[in-house]
Amino acid sequence: MPRAAGTFTIDSWEPEPYDEADGATLTRVHLTKTFDGDLAGTSTTDIITAVAQVETSAAYAGFERFTGTVHGRKGTFVLHHTASAEGEDAGLSWTILPDSGTGELTGIRGGGQIVNDDGAHSFHLDYELG
């Protein structure tokens, strides 16, 4: 299975808290990114975050539409994000929504991870084109 790897930058981050009750704050966030590496392009993402009041635990889930190229093949697809953190223990995975690929990325499937290293974001995506 091919692996795409690289980095991305967050170009915009637009949070809108909608539930700030005791225990945790729930927020809708709209963001845009630029990808460099084996994925080259841009994306638009919408996530729902939950951050505990003590701010040592958090989680989010959401969807991201990528537009660009994967190893030179042009098209779009949708990624499903799932992430959680408790203290220093954190994990983020993403999977490609089956049948969401367009153009030369029609039939793309797979998944991978994002790493946030003090604000520097890198990724890998293991995929197949079927």
Image: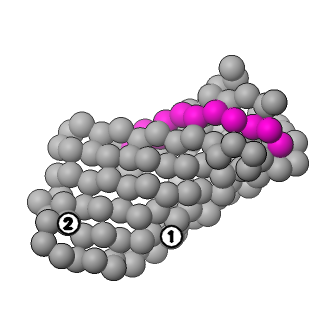
Q: Report the residue marked by disc 1.
A: 30
Magenta segment includes 115: yes
Q: Within the image, what quadrant is residue 28 found in?
A: bottom left
User: What is the crowding at mark 1: few (fewer than 14 residues within 10 Å), some, or many (at least 20)?
Assistant: some
Does 103 sit left or right of 81 as displayed? right
Secondary structure at numbered mark 2: strand
Point out residue 122 in the picture as x, y percentages from the top left corner.
50, 39
Residue type beneath disc 1: His
Secondary structure at numbered mark 1: strand
Marks 1/2: CA–CA distance? 19 Å
Q: Residue at x 35, y 71 (%)?
A: 27
Point out residue 112 in the picture as x, y percentages from the top left corner.
54, 34
User: What is the crowding at mark 2: few (fewer than 14 residues within 10 Å), some, or many (at least 20)?
Assistant: some
Residue type beneath disc 2: Ala
- Magenta stretch bounds: 106-116
Residue 24's disc number: 2
Q: Within the image, what quadrant is residue 91 found in?
A: top left
Q: Magenta region, mostly helix, strand or loop?
A: strand
Q: Residue at x 60, y 49 (%)?
A: 79
Residue 117's disc number: none
